[in-house]
Image (cartoon, grey):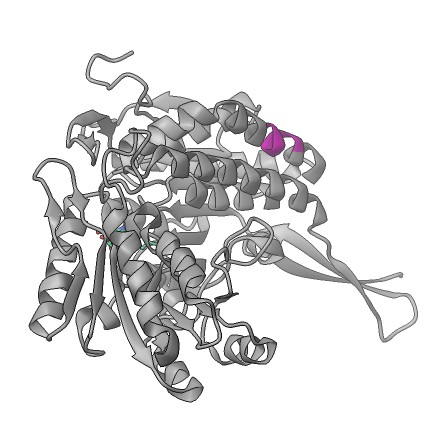
Amino acid sequence: MDGSRTPAYEKLEMFIGGQWCQGGDGKSEDVLNPATEQVLGKLPHASKADLDRALQAAAKGFEVWRKTSAYERGKIIRKAADLIRARADQFATILTLEQGKVLAEAKMEIAGTADIIEWYAEEGKRAYGRVVPGRLPGLRQTVVREPVGVVAAFTPWNFPGITPARKIAGALAAGCSIIIKASEETPGTCIAMARAFVDAGLPPGVLNLVFGVPNDVSTYLLASPIVRKISFTGSIPVGKHLAKLAADGMKRATMELGGHSPVIVFDDADPVKTAEIAAAGKYRNAGQVCISPSRFFVQEKVYDKFADKFIEIAKSLKVGNGMDADTKMGPLANMRRINAMEAVVADVQANGAQIQAGGKRIGNQGYFFQPTVVTEVDEKSKLMRNEVFGPVAPIVRFKTFDEVIKRANGLEYGLAAYAFTKSTATATAVADALESGMVGVNHMMVSTPETPFGGVKESGYGQEGGVEGLDAYLISKFVTQIGV
Ligand code: NAD
C-alpha cells in the first residue's frame, strides 16, 4: 500500500491498455474525504501521451471486443457484476469515504451498480436486427445492429458507482470499447469497478480509465477521430459545451444533464405519508441527485399537514459522517455545494421567504449543511428557477390542475417529475401533461436497470437503462442483397 493512502480506501491509479499506471508527466491531485476534509490519496492525471495510449488501446480493444460473441461478452460482464456483489462492503466503504453519502445508501448504490451491469450482460444478447421484405423476388433486406465504436464517457461525483456502471456496461454489452474519465473527486469506486472487470477476464484495451483536468481530457479525446460516441452525465452548461465538441466530429452523444423536479401533491393524497416519501427523496444523498424532488407544489387543502410533517422530518434528521451508524444525512460532496446552498438561502431570504428548518452550514470542518425547508417562496427566486443540488426544499401552494402544470412545466428542465393523488384519472392526466423524461406517480423510484432514464428539454437527450440504454451504443446497418 502507498504510505499516503487512507486504509480501506482504493489505491489511485489509471488503467490504460490493460496496465495500471500513474500519469506520464507526474501530475496529480488530492482526493478529499468530504466529512473530514482529510486527504484520502493522490490521484494521477493523464498526460497527452497517456491519452494517446488510451485512444490507441481502445481502438485495438474495439477490434477484439466487437468480434467476441455477445454470449461470451455477457459472461465476462456478468462475472464483473458478481465480483462487485462479492466485494460490496469494500466498495461501499470506498464510496462513502470519497463521496460522503451514508454507508447504507452507499451499499444500496453498489447493489444497484451490480444490478445494472448484470442487466446489460443479458441485454447485450438481444441486440436484434430485422429482416425487411424486399420489393423484388430474391431480394433480401436485413438491418443489422453493430457497435458504434470507441466511446468516451465522463461521469460526475454524486453517484460514483451507478453512473460509470451505466456507461461501461452499456458500451461493453453492445460490443464497444470505452475510455472513461470518472470524477476526480470520487475516483476510487470506478477504479474498484475497473478491477472487477479485469478480474472477470476483460481483454486489454476494452476498458480504459483516465483522470485529469476535465476540460483538457474531454477536449483532447473528442478531437480524436478514434472516438465515435460520447456519453456525459453532469451539469447543463458542461453538457452544452461537450455537445458542441461532439458536433464538430459528428459524434453521437448521450447527455444526462440537470433537473429541477417538480412534486405535485393533490388534495386527495395522504399529506403525511406523502411528506414522508418526499422528504426521504429530497434528503437522499443530501439532495445531490439529478432526479431529486426539488420544487414541492402542494394543493391548498393538504398544504399545512404536508408542510408540518416535512419540516418535522427535516428538523429530526441526524447529519454527520456517513460512516457513523446513526447518521441519516452525510456531508455535501465539496465546498462548492456549501457555497451554492448559502447563496440560494440568502437569495430566498432576500425575496421574503421563511426558513422553516435549517438554512446554515454545520461547523467548519467537513461540508455539512442543515436539512432546510423554505416556505412563502417567490417563484422568481433562484431556488425555484435553478437546479438546487443540495438539501434545500421549497414548499409552495397551488389551487388548480392547469395552474400547477403550467408552473411545473415552466422551466427549461425536464428530467424527472412526481405527482401524488388517489385518483386514477388525475394520475393519468398529470403523467400526460408533465414535460419530463420520467414521471413517478405516488412514488419516486424512477431509476431501474431495465427502464429508460433520461431527460427532455435542456435536461439532455438520449437515455440510459432499458432497451434504449443498449440502443445508445448501437448503429443500424442496412444490407440489401440479391442473387446473381
Ligand atoms: P461542473 O459543472 O463543473 O461539473 C459537473 C461534472 O462535469 C463534474 O463531474 C465535472 O468533473 C465534469 N466536467 C466539468 N467540466 C467538464 C468538461 N469540460 N469535460 C468533461 N467533464 C467535465 O459542476 P460541479 O460543481 O461539479 O457540479 C455542480 C453542478 O453540476 C450541480 O449544480 C448540478 O447541476 C450538476 N451535476 C449534475 C449531475 C447529474 O447527475 N446530472 C451530477 C453532478 C453535478
Give 475 or 73, whichever is nearer the viewer.
73
Q: Judge from the rendering whether residue 54 lies leftward or rightward of residue 288; answer left or right.
A: right
Q: How many marks?
A: 0
The residue sitting at 46% across, 47% down in the picture is: 151
- Which quadrant holds residue 157? top left
Q: Where does residue 130 sit, x and y in percent of width and height? A: 77, 60
Residue 46 visible? no
Q: Judge from the rendering whether residue 442 lies leftward or rightward of residue 344; answer left or right.
A: right
Q: Is residue 294 above or below residue 99?
A: below
The residue sitting at 60% across, 51% down in the picture is: 450
Give 4 or 205, whichever is nearer the viewer.
4
Residue 438 visible? yes
Q: Is residue 294 above or below residue 331?
A: below
- Which quadrant holds residue 274? bottom left
Q: Is residue 23 above or below residue 473?
A: above
Give the magenta part as a residue range.
75-79
Q: Is residue 373 above or below residue 38?
A: below
The quadrant of the rendering that contains the N terminus is top left
Q: Judge from the rendering whether residue 369 lies leftward or rightward of residue 463; answer left or right.
A: left
Give 411 or 440, whichever is nearer the viewer.
440
Give 421 or 430, whichever is nearer the viewer.
421
The quadrant of the rendering that contains the C terminus is bottom right
Q: Where does residue 103 sit, x and y in percent of width and height? A: 36, 33
Q: Main secondary structure of the magenta part?
A: helix
Q: Where does residue 414 sit, x and y in percent of width and height? A: 40, 70
Q: Where does residue 388 sit, x and y in percent of width and height? A: 25, 61
The residue sitting at 30% across, 25% down in the picture is: 12
Q: Is residue 351 magenta?
A: no
Can you name the residue that lies furthest to the right here? Answer: 137
